[in-house]
Amino acid sequence: MHRTHRLARLAVHRDGLQFATTDAGPATGEVVVCLHGFPQGPEAYDAVVPRLTAQGLRVLVPEQRGYCATARPPRPRDYALRELVADVLAVADAAGAERVHLLGHDWGGVVAWATAAWHPDRVASLTVLSQAHPAAFRAAVVRSSQALRSAYVGFFQLPVLPERLLLARGGAGLAGSLRRTGLPAGLAEGYARRHREPGRLSAALNWYRAPGPAARVGPVDVPVTYLHGRRDPFYSATAVARTGEHVRGPYRRIELDATHWLPELEPAAVARAVTETVLAAAEVPGRS
């Protein structure tokens, strides 16, 4: 086991935006990029990062588009999936990494799936938390309870009303909804407090409001580990089970007795899965 205390800031710039990005672990280690979901922030990985750096990995955690005050364009179309993927490549470029290992949770998982599908030359492996492959998710909407589980997406796409309800009474609406899905009160209230920053919640909701159909995400060829909680209220068993159909490289699915919030509540399992996936990727011919 490696021990390192290096913690720095990585300067990441793209199209006039600047993404606050922490850079931890040995500078020569395999690079892992951690992508948070909604309504989290980089702090979602606070308990995961030291476990990964202890294994000799270099870990980058960007505050993603809309969540970061210096990377908050105003238009919903600026949050299209291809823009979010390009942001990830900008992080890799800033780190001087030809290829990175992606770790994505929730919306960050969507971005990770898309990055691996569209840019397999830049992705060494993929560990996805609580996020089915987009194609499996789309198919499950018409074949399972997935449409009901995802009803909140339509609500988030409404103008103005989501912000008013979620931020009412100092963010009590948002905090309450997070608690009901299994996030402890302290973490729920912390995320809600962060979204009281002017413009932050609207920008985060723009991930859902980006116009037009979501860009198609095809099969993934890189090694993939998919972790999901059996008590996750957001994903149907059909979406979970069919995710493997969209992975052409080495694939494993790990089910945890957990809810949706795996980075915060299952950091040891997450770190173990990432470390094992990084090692497995090194053994794939042509990807070492």
Image (cartoon, rainbow, N blue to C red):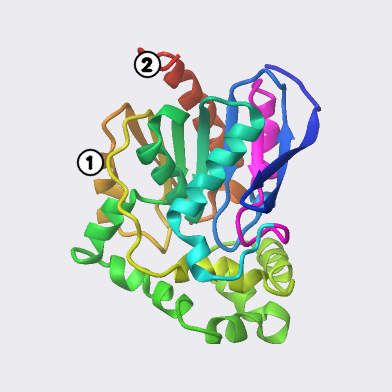
Amino acid on which disc 2 is placed = Val
Res. 123 in view: no
Q: Secondary structure at mark 1?
A: helix
Residue highlighted by disc 1: 245
| Residue at image point 72% right, 27% down | 25
Q: Quadrant of residue 173?
A: bottom right
- Expressed as whole percent of the image width and height from the top left, the position of residue 240 reads 31, 50
Residue at image mark 2: 284
* Residue 169 on image: x %, y %: 71, 86
Q: Whole-percent x and y of residue 157?
A: 45, 77
The alpha-carbon separation of the residues under discs 1 and 2 comes to 20 Å
Side of 154 relative to 238 (left or right):
right
In the image, is residue 253 part of the stretch drawn in magenta?
A: no
Disc number placed over residue 205 in the picture, else none: none
Against 65, is 48 above or below? Answer: above
First in sequence: mark 1 vs mark 2: 1
Nearest the eye: 22 or 210: 210
- The residue range painted magenta reads 45-70
